[in-house]
Amino acid sequence: MIRVLLVRWSRYNPYYLEPEPRKEVYHIPETELTPEQKEERELKSVRPIKAATNSVTSSVFNDPVLSKFVNMMMKDGDKIIAKGIITQTLENMKRKQVEKYHKAPEVKKAEIECNPYVIFHQALENCKPVIGLASIQKGGKFYQVPIPLTDNRRRFLAMKWMITECRDNKHRRTLMYEKLSQELLAAFSKEGNVVKRKHELHKMAESNRAYAHYRWW
Amino acid sequence: TCLSGTSKNACQSEQHLGQYYTVPASHFHTVFPHGLPPRYQQQVKTFNEGCVMVRQPALELISHLKRADYINPTLRYLLYGVKGSGKTMSLCHAVHYCSTQGWLVLHIPDAHLWVKNCKELLPSSYHASRFDQPIQASNWLRNFRTTNEHFLSKIKLRQRYVWTKRESTEEGRPLGELVDMGVSRVKSSSDVVGAVLKELRLQAGGTEGGFRLAVAVDGVNGLWGRTTLKKEDKSPVAPEELTLVHNLRKMINNDWCGGAVIATLSQTGSLYAPSSAYLPQELLGEEGFDSMDPFIPVPVSLYSEKEFESCYLYYLDRHWLQHPHSQTEEGKKELIFLSNRNPSVLERLCAFL
């Protein structure tokens, strides 16, 4: 069991700046810097910088969307189990797709997508709702009003639906990574329960079009 | 440099070091019903083919097997190495070589499975103080039957065996009948295993209809040491008190001729052994080392640079490394750093990348 100790606290003086984990930024030579980048470097050499979190790495395989998904899947702060489930899911998806690839005839090989990261991102895109509903009070009654959603909110809703779907609607004996890989592959081809939920939300918003002018922002 | 088309393992030599050779699909079910590591079996299913890398320890073993003379008592080879360095795979490579050369192969997939997690321990009918394990014995006999189909009708028994008051197997009956009886009569399957091993030991070096016998044992350090099994009065069972272990120890002694014993140490399934132990002295213990002595030690090391390259190119070729960054130089350096060239760690890393 690997113990991970927290070094960074989440509340800092606003004077502190965010750290830059990517390696490419530091490899640009002096001459090719634009004036804004030079200013930024000047500022960073004077101001203090926050410590980097444990989940952020300078490795090329670091993926912010995947880290967010791992954090949402985590229960009781057990990141190791959540990360383990996600890696098993990716491996499972890759195995299914590679097996299909090797058994398919030459013509169909180009259409089969084997990269689990591409499948994951595409599936998440297919689950993101375009428009959401908010409960607004007008004249004593509450109406479900269609409102635009920010990008973060859409991403959050897609991940939340995916995780709740996999936790609730599965057989007692199926493991989490098995169910997740089935759902992600289904969402990649726009079938499955999560895209169905997204479509239902869109239909509700469409049917409540009349209340759209209750929104004042 | 990766896929060599030769599936003839008799002509593999140092030129093929680092290259992969394909095991024909028909061989998998007959030669390896129970020998391969589980992750490798998944890999074979995914890639729709089984490729094994030709490495130095396996080649050394095969060259020893080619040049040894079988009139002297059996030579014992012991594969040892760090966790995940490819000992079981080298053993399976050698077993495949033996079976293509027409030897009779006695492959015990993991000796640790016989000293732990046993649901049924019956007191033995043959010997008062020993214990039988019917499930493990019948499973092993079933797999043994699949591996050595063509030998079962040729070998004849040299002794009469009596199982119960009504059942007995006469002299001169084929071995296949004995094995079938062991699979169907589960209660006496451990004694059947003992009888089979004894017959094979007697007949291995014989000049008329002689065959060569290869005994391949994985996790041989489980035969000496402690077990987790308990008798009904909660006192621990020593390994000598199990019929299967007792008979297997007689096989590993070098008092018979006409074959070879290839063994692997394994820390993963071992009981009461620290996880950093990998040397024969530490894992076999005093008793085990004295019984295995003299043996030929074969160290299995981590991948060299050439072998790592070969493995990396094989995964690329089979479309296993899908992450775009893993196909660049940066990603490759990172894989070397993270896995330290350990074959099993590399396999687990590449699985999700």
Image (tube, coloured by chain):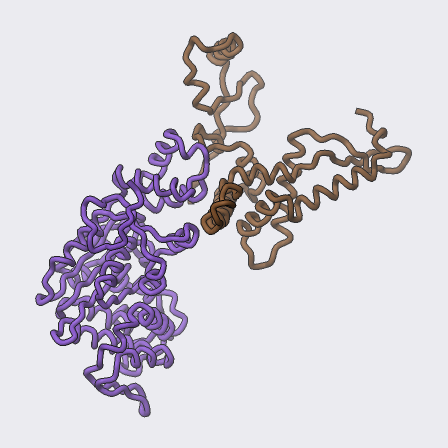
Would residue B173 be found to the left or right of residue B48 on screen?
A: left
Would residue B313 be found to the left or right of residue A104 on screen?
A: left
User: Is residue B265 visible in this depiction of the protein?
Assistant: no
Name the residue at the right extreme.
Answer: A139
Quadrant including the C terminus of chain B: top left
Q: Is residue A150 above or below residue B275?
A: above
**Residue for point 24% across, 55% down:** B8
**Residue for point 31% across, 77% down:** B179
Percent x, y of residue B146? 33, 69
**Residue for point 48% across, 44% down:** A87
| Rendered shade, chain B | purple
| Residue A59, quarter of the rendered image | top left
The chain drawn brown is chain what? A
Q: How many marks?
A: 0
- Observer-nearest of A53 and B37: B37
Name the residue at the bottom extreme.
Answer: B166
Percent x, y of residue B123? 33, 79
Q: Is residue A72 above or below residue B191?
A: above
| Residue B222, quarter of the rendered image | bottom left
Quadrant including the N terminus of chain B: top left
Q: Is residue A211 above or below residue B265?
A: above
Name the residue at the front extreme.
Answer: A107
- Observer-nearest of B7 and B319: B7
Percent x, y of residue B154? 23, 77
Would residue B304 be found to the left or right of residue B133 on screen?
A: left
- Observer-nearest of A184 and B287: A184
**Residue for point 41% across, 42% down:** B350
User: Is residue A120 visible in this depiction of the protein?
Assistant: yes
Would residue B274 be found to the left or right of residue B289 on screen?
A: right
Percent x, y of residue A116? 51, 41
